[in-house]
Amino acid sequence: MSAALLVRSLREPAGVAGLDATGWNALIAAAKAERLIGTLACRLDGIAIPPAVRPILDDARRDSAREAQQALWEADRAALALAPLGLRVVLLKGTAYAAADLQAGQGRFIGDLDILVPREVVSAAEQALIGAGWEWVKEDAYDDAYYRQWMHELPPLIHIERDRLIDVHHTVLPLTARQTPDAAAMIADAIAITDGLYVLSAEDRVVHAAAHMLADGDLQGGLRNLWDIYCLLPETDRAALKARAAHHGLARHVAQARRLADAIYGHGVRLTLWDRLIRARLLARDGWGRETRKLLVFAFYVRSHWLRMPPLMLARHLWIKWRKGHRPQ
Amino acid sequence: MKHAITLRIGPATFRIGSAWPQPIAELARLYAAYPDILGAIADFTVRLQPASRLRRYVRPSIFITGDHGLADAAPMSLAHGLLAAEMGMNLQMALGWRRHLLLHASSVEKDGRALVMTGESGSGKSTLAALLGERGWRLMGDEFALLDLDSGAILPFPRLVSLKNRAIDVVAQEVGETRMGPLLRATAKGDIRHMIPRADAIARMGHGAMPALLLFPRFGHDPAMRAVGRGEIFMRLTQASTNYVALGEPAFAALTRFVTGVPARAIDFPSGDAAIEMVDRLWEEHL
């Protein structure tokens, strides 16, 4: 399994010395598929690698540096657009890690800009962004209504000139999820990094990452999310993290994220049966970068819907999506 | 994957895997003259996989993907497997190559200087490069010209030349059947046939050349020639590049140098012979 090779190489970079060409091809394919190639490149900095690998990792490092630069520029533009509202704009995920210069940001792939704003100002924030050149991406009326009624974020907006997406969150999990984290407390305790821009506290960063990975979604990109968590954990106070996770109703998820991070990227720890299933899903990637364990992957896809919605609502949602031609992969 | 081959074209190495043997066998035959690099570490992985479980066996249909893929790419018939492999390699270059500025252009070399030809699909740039490659020029590539960010040289990417529709017979007559691939009928782009570059183009695929002339060819019009302003050239080349934005400031500097240093003409032509005559005349004038 090449995902296993990928996590082993992130854990112990010196171990790549023993790889042959087949091993390197598998490692690179898995790292690209998991969008961890930039992270891998940073981890292998200073380690002896074959000449053919060097330019591949140099490319990845350069790409991640450009992504960070672009992400910070987008954050700056969003802050400018939202400045008249006088609110705290909290950066989330990749952009936050780059802005705060955290280890989790080293070489990290950054896609969209994710920000968190107080729920009561979310409409005003949307209007301000639209006034500054962002526009709606989703044309579909059902999707739009669904986002607005049930999701933890606005429908994605794209900037008309820069072609970059922004996700405006007002809380951490969909409103239909069983847990209801305290977004107001997250915003209140956020840390200022520049004029108007904030990042979550060290503990809330882990809570948010764990919620995102384990209480929502189908674990696509899970190895990357778990690497974030692994890098974010040392910055937290363990007792404070436990208390904070409990406050958000996510104690179980944070504890599991810690176990998985230790087991996969750290020194190993006892795993429950449920942990092992998640680990099997996370490592479902072969030497060609293909997803394996189709049934398990599909089961987690089904679970992601189950997490998101009560049964009747899910049935209605799937029926509407089916009629619109959506099919699971 | 079950069937695989590793190919090096210019500076890039591809590992191509396929669920079926046919595309790999065709690649092995047509790329036989290229360097043997079995088991090398590849810059890119290309995968030709079944569009669905059923489509491995029943009306087999290929989904092209790899390190870089397009989720909404249309599946292709296994009969067009060779084209799928070529498209898979192009896709990796277009979306993933970072070591040079990638120009969607053909290029040929003579006397150590490069002629670069750029234009939309159907402009005749591939056919023209293929014909010039048989008439005293060295073919550097029919799809991508790689502009070196430091030296300003054009580096070759001499993959198989992809010929479409009417160009097929014109070129096949010139080069002979042994250097032609199978005829792929009724693809999304019409009939397609691949041509193996001459041995010198393959042997010297590591050697670049400084650009001396840029042409914007347009096939199917009365012969005409016009100058093109630098602003227009710059804009058209940024549009012809898939990694201009990703490379940032170094790409801007390299392209500025290219546009200010290389003379350019737009040429319209009704036939290959007319085009070659125009190219030879322009080449004399500018050297």
Image (tube, rainbow, N blue to C red):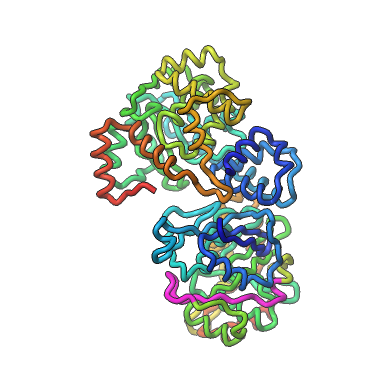
Q: Nearer the viewer, residue B32 or B262?
A: B32
Part of the protein shown in magenta: B184-202
Left-right relation of B249 to A173:
right
Residue lying at 69% horizontally and 49% vertically, measured from the top left:
A53
Q: Position of residue B204 (x, y in %)?
A: 73, 70
Is B211 displayed left or right of B55 in the figure? right
Q: Nearer the viewer, residue A132 or B39?
A: B39
Q: Quadrant of the N terminus of chain A?
A: top right
Q: Residue at x 46, y 31 (%)?
A: A213
**On screen, residue A187 above or below B214:** above
Which of the two residues, B50 or B70, is positioned nearer the viewer here?
A: B50
- Which residue is located at x 55 percent, y 23 percent? A270
Image spot of residue A141 (x, y percent): 26, 44
The image quadrant of residue A167 is top left
Task: Say whether residue B201 is magenta.
Answer: yes
Image side of residue B196 versus residue A272, left or right = right
On screen, residue A19 above or below A101: below
Which residue is rendered at x = 58% and y = 79% of the image? B180
